[in-house]
Image (spheres, rainbow, N blue to C red):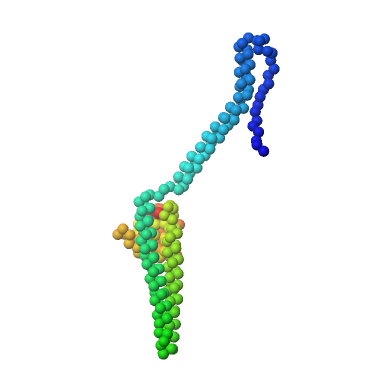
Amino acid sequence: MEPKLLSFKIRLHYPEPQAFPGFVTSLFSSVLFLANLYPALIFAALFEDRVAQSKTNYRREKERKHISLPIMDDAKVAAKQRILTECLRIQRQVVENARKAMADAQESANEGDDSTEEKLYNSYREEMHNKRDMFARQYELSMDDLNLLNQIVMSKEYHKAEFGSVVETDSGVYFISVSLGQVKVDSKIVFAISALAPVYKSFEGKKIGDSFTFRDKSFKIKDIY
């Protein structure tokens, strides 16, 4: 059912125009015109006010988002990207080494099927199977770490020490990611540590300017990104 537009009309009963001077007739015509135009003017004014209010709300929301989510400095983004790239390269190598060691252990266990020294062979094969299982666990763990690194969002801005952040202190730089130890990036040493590392627990959740102590040594956080 189509909506019906409301209109307002005023019916004025007055004598024939011939009975009045010309200016009186014009006056009555103007009154009739304004009486029909008034509702439209009111609607237009209300509509314009709503549009202005919407623009104001949009501008305030945009300013609020700009304050809460500022754009991270390009230099920091580039530095963090180089750190992450190097950690990914190292972790992929760890995965490949574990995969190769697992395959080699399996291949060694399969050799010597025609050996006459069955007991000796069975003992050796069991040892190779144990090694294969050990390397298989290492492979799974290294794949988990690789997946964690791939989950780090470069566009996110960090305001506290948490997974995925780079924390610069007055005594070293830490990348909260996976446990890779010292990673050399741009001729500088970055400590890639996991969220389970004891040193991370000492400054977890802290912000720029905060201090913490680890193994009787004091540190101060200079930057987080």
The foreground one among 105 and 176 is 105
Residue 132: x and y in percent read 43, 76
Task: State whether residue 191 appears in this view.
Answer: no
Left/right placement of residue 61 relative to residue 221 reads right
Q: Residue at x 38, y 53 (%)?
A: 77
The residue sitting at the left extreme is 187
Q: Residue at x 44, y 62 (%)?
A: 148
Work out whether 224 lies above or below 97.
Answer: above
The foreground one among 121 and 94 is 121
Q: Residue at x 40, y 54 (%)?
A: 225
Q: Quadrant of residue 98?
A: bottom left
Q: Quadrant of residue 116?
A: bottom left
Task: State whether residue 118 appears in this view.
Answer: yes
Residue 172: x and y in percent read 35, 59
The residue sitting at the bottom extreme is 116
The foreground one among 207 and 185 is 185
Q: How many marks?
A: 0
Residue 43: x and y in percent read 59, 30
The foreground one among 28 and 48 is 28
Left/right placement of residue 50 relative to residue 11 reads left
Q: Quadrant of the N terminus?
A: top right
Work out whether 119 lies above or below 137.
Answer: below
Work out whether 65 lies above or below 204.
Answer: above
Q: Residue at x 43, y 47 (%)?
A: 70
Work out whether 195 lies above or below 101.
Answer: above
Residue 31: x and y in percent read 62, 19
